[in-house]
């Protein structure tokens, strides 16, 4: 008799508990979700971005001289980049191509791709351009308008940051795939004095890669392009093509920058529409890709003061800016792999 009463009481308690759960609207799935939310998750370990190292990588590129396609300095720097990127990544691909510039010049170019976990389908794309402008056609001195530039900020800075990120990733364990692409011939667009038709004369390397990826059926969850990311007091605004094609990635990167204390650089304001490597990646491949690029509305051309001039040299490069960009990007990437 006592045993039966205990059983009845136990059944009564179970019924009451189920009724309460039903009235509260919590089902088993909701309970599991709430439990998982309340469990403490292990934090993502984000390495410290070394701005000194990134600065060295920029300085090394500049030491070769202008990296203009068909020049020996371009070939020499390309060889160094292949070896350096290959020393950090699991696989390095070199994608040679012959492309035609706006003036009919045939350019011998090479896109350089370093891949981590190349066999994984879940991928992230990071990119920059490694060539430099063949003309200082924005220089205040007309005598310099057909001279090639050092491109410390416009070219080398994005590559330097990505090389440091590659070095940090090489010391980490992760299962996702990451591709770091150094595009060639981004800056061989038409000269300012050119009066003819020159549609799509910029970003020739990324146009070629987007139509001929280094592996068949290549796709990445998203991409981040770095361009002109090394000048002092740089302003990175929402580039409008980025916000059109990948608003979620833009917001994620800028939110991360603000949480890290870099709101001075990453400003939540709309900038302009900029034709750059990311534009063709978005349009041709459909990979949502954003551009972190220096935008300055006080300059007539919209970029940093020394843009496309002979003064785009190592004097322009600021380690604080490199730190802001590099730490933001590695934090975003580490949180996603």
Image (cartoon, rainbow, N blue to C red):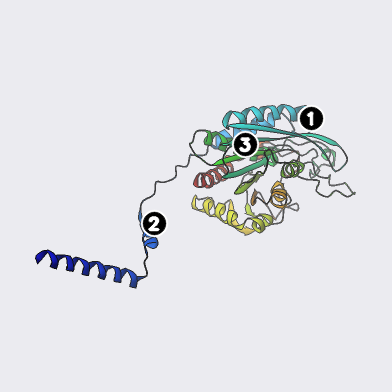
Q: Is residue 205 above or below residue 11?
A: above
Lower sequence index among marks 2 and 1: 2
Q: Of residues 42 and 307, which is closer to you in this image?
A: 42
Residue drawn at point x = 66 percent, y = 54 percent: 242
Tell me which corner region of the image, top left, top right, bottom left or bottom right, holds residue 311.
top right
Q: Does residue 256 show up? A: yes
Crowding near the residue tagged with mark 3, few <14, some 14–19, many ≥20 C-alpha atoms within 10 Å: many
Foreground disc of the pair 2, 1: 2
Crowding near the residue tagged with mark 1, few <14, some 14–19, many ≥20 C-alpha atoms within 10 Å: few
Q: How far is disc 1 from disc 3 in space, using C-alphas?
A: 21 Å
Q: How far is disc 2 from disc 1 in space, using C-alphas?
A: 57 Å
C-beta proximity under 8 Å, tags 3 and 2: no
Residue drawn at point x = 59 percent, y = 28 percent: 87
Residue drawn at point x = 85 percent, y = 48 percent: 198
Which residue matches tag 2? 37
Q: Which mark is residue 71?
A: 1
Give how far across and how far down residue 114 sits, in percent: 62, 35
Lower sequence index among marks 3 and 2: 2
Give how far across and how far down residue 276 sits, in percent: 72, 48
Q: Of residues 319 and 127, which is closer to you in this image?
A: 127
Number of numbered tags placed on the structure image: 3
Which residue matches tag 3? 160
Crowding near the residue tagged with mark 2, few <14, some 14–19, many ≥20 C-alpha atoms within 10 Å: few
């Amino acid at each position: 008799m006592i045993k039966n009463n205990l059983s009845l009481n136990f059944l009564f308690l179970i019924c009451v508990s189920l009724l309460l759960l039903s009235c509260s609207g919590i089902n088993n799935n909701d309970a599991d979700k709430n439990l998982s939310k309340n469990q403490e998750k292990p934090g993502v370990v984000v390495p410290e971005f070394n701005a000194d190292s990134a600065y060295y990588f920029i300085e090394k590129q500049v030491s070769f001289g202008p990296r203009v396609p068909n020049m020996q300095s371009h070939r020499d720097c390309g060889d160094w980049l292949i070896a350096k990127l290959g020393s950090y990544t699991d696989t390095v691909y070199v994608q040679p191509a012959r492309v035609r510039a706006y003036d009919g010049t045939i350019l011998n170019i090479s896109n350089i791709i370093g891949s981590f976990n190349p066999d994984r389908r879940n991928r992230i794309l990071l990119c920059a351009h490694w060539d430099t402008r063949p003309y200082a056609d924005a220089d205040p001195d007309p005598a310099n308008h057909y001279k090639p530039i050092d491109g410390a900020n416009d070219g080398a800075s994005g590559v330097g940051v990505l090389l440091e990120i590659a070095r940090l990733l090489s010391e980490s364990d992760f299962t996702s795939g990451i591709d770091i692409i150094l595009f060639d011939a981004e800056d061989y667009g038409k000269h300012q004095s050119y009066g003819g038709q020159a549609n799509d004369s910029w970003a020739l390397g990324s146009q070629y890669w987007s139509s001929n990826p280094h592996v068949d059926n290549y796709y990445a969850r998203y991409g981040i392009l770095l361009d002109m990311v090394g000048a002092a007091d740089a302003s990175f605004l929402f580039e409008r093509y980025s916000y059109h094609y990948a608003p979620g990635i833009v917001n994620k990167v800028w939110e991360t920058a603000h949480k890290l204390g870099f709101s001075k650089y990453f400003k939540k304001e709309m900038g302009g529409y900029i034709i750059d490597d990311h534009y063709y990646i978005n349009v041709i491949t459909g990979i949502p890709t954003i551009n972190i690029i220096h935008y300055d509305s006080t300059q007539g051309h919209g970029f940093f003061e020394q843009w496309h001039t002979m003064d785009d040299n190592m004097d322009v490069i600021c380690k604080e800016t490199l730190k802001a960009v590099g730490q933001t990007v590695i934090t975003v990437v580490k949180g996603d792999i």
